[in-house]
Image: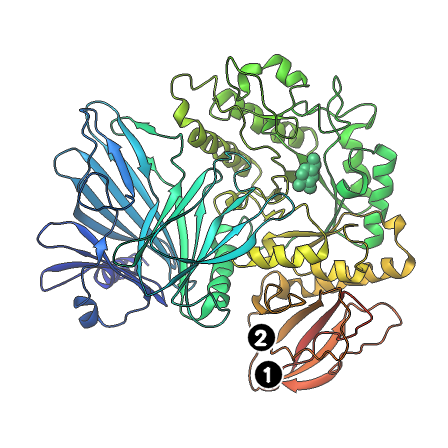
Amino acid sequence: MKIKSVILYIFLLFAFVFKINGETIIPITTNDISLIYKVDEKTGRLYQSYLGQKLSYDSDIALLPLGKEAYLTHGMEDYFEPAIRVLHNDGNPSLLLKYVSHENKQPQSGIHETIILLKDEVYPVEVKLHFITYPKENIIKEYAEISHREKKPIVLYNYASSLLHLNAEKYFLTDFSGEWAKEVCMNETPLTYGKRIVDSKLGSRANMICSPFFMLSVNEKAQENTGEILLGTLGWTGNFRFIFEVDNLNGLRIISGINPYASEYTLKPNEVFRTPEFIFTYSAEGKGKASRDMQRWARKYQLKDGEKSRMTLLNNWEATHFAFDENKLVDIMDEAVKLGVDMFLLDDGWFANKYPRKNDRQGLGDWDETVTKLPNGIGKLVKEATNKGLKFGLWIEPEMVNPKSELYEKHKDWVIHLPNRDEYYYRNQMVLDLSNLEVQDYVFGVVDNLMTKYPGIAYFKWDCNSPITNIYSPYLKNQQSHLYIEYVRGLYAVLDRVKAKYPNLPMMLCAGGGGRTDYEALKYFTEFWPSDNTDPIARIFIQWGYSHFFPAKSMAAHVTSWNKQASIKFRTDVASMCKLGFDIRVHDMNEADLAYCKEAVINFNRLSPVILDGEQYRLVSPYEGNKDHAAVMYTNENADKAVLFAYDINPVFKYNYFPTPVRLQGLKKDARYKLEEINLYKGTESKFKYHNKVLTGEFLMQVGVPAFSADPTIPTSSRVIEITEIK
Ligand code: DGJ
């Protein structure tokens, strides 16, 4: 075993480091991607020679032009945005990095790492660029470690995780921006000379407006199955910034990292500043392949419990808001049993006594059950749920405080707020100062105390409804520009403790909807809440947007009363494309709807290995054409089982309307598949042309099926088709 590892190590060393004609070449590769660095022999500086589809021949690589400087510094001869800008303690603001060495490692089977060491020859500052590659999934992670041995601290003004160069005729950027209840709207724009910045300064609920991910398509607009495209995302649960700069030679520079806004960082001698990871993939087969690579990688390596199953649930937020008591909750648990879901999730409104949490204006921070609402506490609810065969989940928002709370009265010094200024509130609340170790203990204690008292709690929904307002830390005193960074580090320190003590505790990441959706946070969370908007039509767009980066199993989707014009079937079918849940009063449903939902839960459980763990194919985009249809399918690993979801979403009646057949993907050409429409109301017959018919993969992928209803009398309708190989 040991000998094997040594041989592998030697192989890796030669496979990833080579010199041709004395030139040092450092290829960072996956099965389909090459990112190639070269060292300029004359100057000793590091250049990025290539990024794109895999280059297979060393003889070609040797002849690649040098390219552009890799991790550009401020103060030298480049005219554009630098990756790093420092101020030495003698007042010199420049940095000149030269290649020193590089090494290759295999941190884990199937994962490779290359570390390139760069140093300034005049000032003792060094930068280590780390590249971690997942060859099979075609994912590259990049981050930097910055340190120095000057006598006094230096100041970091810019500290990017990554600087990538592309060289093409045209570039198209898709960002995913929006607002509360309007998350991840996809906007594609061409990039021309100059800079485009996508960033956030919101601190805690960091991506309420802009998301920390983007798509960059080369030469033509992003296509699903063709064309070259880079998908990138930053693993940082705080302020981020992407700069896209087209330079004078029409080269594109993509700088990704923490947003350095109001965040100059004083770095002590020998302290290592580690940037967050920039995670990217490059596909030459359109965004569909790029997303599938990213989703597969996330399930396998990044998302908490990415390869484990998920629980269906009934939540009470939309159904009750703050208006509940023990009896009502027990009634709702009975409704969960009727639906056949795995868990009951109690949302906001269960805590605080001096200022009971009867609305969002008070109580946040006081994590004892409100005795008037829950006289027998959470323990009784856990017991009731358990007796009914349900798991019990609980909502918390431990990073926040209402000024009207006992916590605020006792510990104003724990609250981020500006001295000598009026307080400004977002959703009537403020953010606790996670840079303070005592506050970290308190936040960890919210989970720990609940788990100690009620070990039966099986799940947490961890909410975060406010950006950081009144930005000033009573704890950091004269180091205020560290606050945005220390806040996030403090959050990770707390989440590390939670994960270490409760490794099997699933948690949902929520931030007033989708205000926190990054891959560093998702190391600690099994799923996230994409949006408070659960109108199924809006959700088709929202889920579509997120799917470019995140697997279905990481997205919680609930059937609610938003958009009652859409049938329960339509609402349930949309939610069944992700991690299915409900947030609705079952006693308001008629029998047919309840029977429908029960059946849909059974179908979802049966098909969840395909939907939650399979490959996703986006077939018909809701963004394209008349924006009146969408279709998505999932296949399992062997492509012997698949599920197709198809939606008519334009509520405008159309006559003489014949939508084109939907061509499926990801099936085996020569296999024979039986098609069956499922999720039908009891007693209704399928009108799907190929219901219970057998067709080959070839037919399904080349001819396609009339998946949409084309019924002008129904404004919104949905179809779910189960596809099974006949062996
Ligand atoms: C915002 C979340 O997005 C909702 O789902 C709900 O949990 C509320 N907060 C509760 O205050």
Residue at the image position 55 percent from the left and 75 percent from the top: 666
Residue under label 1: 697
Image quadrant containing the N terminus: bottom left
Residue 518 marker? none
Q: Please tell me whether mark 1 sits on a helix, a strand or a loop.
A: helix
Q: Residue at x 73, y 78 (%)?
A: 657
Q: Nearer the viewer, residue 108 or 286?
A: 286
Please say if the residues under marks 1 and 2 sit with CB atoms less than 8 Å apart.
yes
Residue type at numbered disc 1? Gly
- In this rendering, does residue 690 appear at all? yes
Q: Quadrant of ligand 1?
A: top right
Q: Is residue 458 visible?
A: no
Figure label count: 2
As drawn, 629 above or below 36: below
Quadrant in the picture for residue 650: bottom right
Which image quadrant for residue 133?
A: bottom left
Foreground mark, 1 or 2, reads 1
The quadrant the C terminus occupies is: bottom right
Residue 496 sits above or below residue 20 on the image: above
Q: Earlier in the sequence, mark 1 or mark 2?
A: 2
Q: Please tell me which residue is depicted at 44% across the width and 47% down the height of the picture.
A: 234
> Badge 1 local density, few (<14 within 10 Å), some, or many (20+)?
many
Q: CA distance from mark 1 to mark 2?
A: 10 Å
Q: Position of residue 414 (x, y in %)?
A: 54, 19
Q: Which kind of residue does numbered mark 2 sit on?
A: Ala
Q: Is residue 285 left or right of residue 693?
A: left
Q: What x and y, as percent, mark residue 469?
A: 54, 27
Q: Which mark is residue 639?
A: 2
Near-viewer residue (324 or 111): 324
Q: For residue 75, which quarter of the picture?
A: top left
Residue sitting at the far right: 591
Q: Nearer the viewer, residue 299 or 164?
A: 164
